[in-house]
Image (cartoon, rainbow, N blue to C red):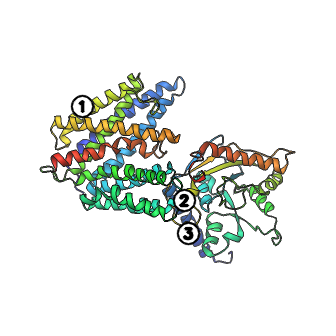
Amino acid sequence: MGSESAPMRHLIRLLAAFTAGAVVVLARLVTAVRAEWRECEPSLRPRVYFANHASHGDFALLWTVLPACLRTRTRPVAAADYWLQGPLRRFLIRQVFGAVLIDRRRDVSRVDPIDLMARALDDGASLMFFPEGTRNRTCAPLLPFKSGLYRLVRARPAVECVPVWIDNLNRVLPKGEWLPVPLLCTATFGAPITVQPAESQAAFLERARRALLDLRARTHLDARGAET
Amino acid sequence: MNAAPGLSGLIATVTSVLIVATVIGRVLAVRSASKTGNSTIQNLNARIDAWWIMVTFGGLALAFGKFGVIVLFAVLSFAALREFITLTRVRPEDHWALLTAFFVAVPLQYYLIAIEWYGLYSILIPVYAFAVMPMISVLRAEPKAFLERTAEAQWGLMIAVYCLSYVAALATLPIAGYEGRGVLLIGYLLLISQASDVLQYVWGKLLGRTPIAPTLSPAKTVEGCVLGIASAVALGTVFSWLTPFEPWQAAVLTLVTTTLGFMGGLVMSAIKRDRGVKDWGSVIPGHGGLLDRLDSLVFGAPVFFHMTRYWWAG
């Protein structure tokens, strides 16, 4: 994009704003999603919200529960190879969500993805980050984390990482289904963590993972149902 | 729209009570603010504020007559079913059975009420949904916890859709000499059941000593329950002018309906305790979920409907 005329750009922006509103209304209608800010308050400072990733709807849900003033400055980190396929996905991810797009094929990518994310933080944006690196299609609550989160906080060590547990969305839209069944969802925000000066990659990622699992233990309607 | 005669009197009365409650709540808040922030009073004011919204929606629906009430309760059933199913053990294999419940059973039940097909809406969920939902689930060939999953989903439909839909169905009862005033019967049922809840809460806070079911619902007391139901019966008798009932008949119907309402509240509490949650949801500030407000109607509404139908619309 970028080659469009001025009226066309206005039209696209209008359409994006309308779609953004529709996403919020739809997410609320289906899931009545509620934010629980535990041990963490909404803030305008650039932050990294890191969450579990079980469904494509995770972006939309997390984005919906953020206060409107934070929503416009919070950018999801998304995989370019998936989201740039087809005009609809491209429109959603670029114009509506304003994502930082990452090329997961490290060998062919020319720009360092960590550098892209760090620059977005420098510009005052917050990031939505899914440290599992891919959607969790297993029965385990959380996949092992990829190194990305650690490399990002090493690049910007002062940034606060806020764990967010998104609960129930995998039941709303189990894998392989296309029609959502309406169920209540919550997004629980836990205490922010920052990387320690001498902390190793394994130690930091384990701490971050533990923070998410702790939130799950407190919000998930226990581990019966789908996992027993 | 042709609002039923008498509706304005009901709405004016409820609004006056709310104004008084709002003033009392705010005075209590100002007086307690000097000491420490009192969470009971904060919650009381949140509840009163939410009542304004609920009364506005209810009043508007009643003013629009039968169809207003049907639309309102169809939406409430949908949202209440969402709360109920969230707490069940259904699995991904039940996805299409649940989609059927939400997107077929709910609209169909209320459509049948709208066309006043009593013979079918009174058995749609207990007979047809009962058979169809497990048939859809079983296509995925997953036997694990099959009976629990099926039973819980069916319970959700019975509570959130079947039982609640009887409130809307009241507007369709043909009662001689009461034509065009069916929605008033709904206003009356909502008034006595919700007033009973509020009065049980108020009496319980003022005089409650003896827990009635500490393992199910720690806040409920014998004093609150007895005095609350007794005051609701008095209220139901005074407001019998809304209904086709004689005052003594209204008293009996109110006693039965609010006692069932109390028991409904206990049953729904037992489910919540087992699932380890305090409220069904959080859509109504101060109250919790929709089911926390509607639990006193789930058993009361069908019985109130059938008593009225049997003795007055026969």
- Rate crowding at label 1 as few (under 14), some (14 to 19) or many (20 or more) other CA atoms within 10 Å: some
Frontmost of labels 3 and 1 is: 1
Q: Position of residue A193 (x, y in %)?
A: 74, 44
Q: Which residue is mark 2?
A: B92
Q: Could you give the CA–CA distance between mark 3 and mark 1, rounded to whole angstroms?
A: 58 Å
Q: Amino acid at mark 3?
A: Leu
Pointers 3 and 2 in contact (C-beta within 8 Å): no
Q: Is residue B82 left or right of residue B304?
A: right
Q: Amino acid at mark 2?
A: Pro
Q: Are marks 3 and 2 on the same chain?
A: no
**Element at label 2:** helix
Q: Quadrant of residue B255?
A: top left
Q: Are marks 1 and 2 on the same chain?
A: yes
- Chain ID at mark 1: B
Q: Residue at x 81, y 61 (%)?
A: A115
- Chain ID at mark 2: B
Label drawn at residue B57: none
**Element at label 1:** helix
Q: Would residue B6 be visible to someone looking at this image?
A: no
Quadrant of the rendering where the N terminus of chain B is positioned: bottom left
Q: Could you give the CA–CA distance between mark 3 and mark 2, rounded to whole angstroms?
A: 34 Å
Q: Position of residue A159 (x, y in %)?
A: 76, 49
Question: In front: B45, or B106?
Answer: B106
Q: Residue at x 29, y 52 (%)?
A: B168
**Element at label 3:** helix
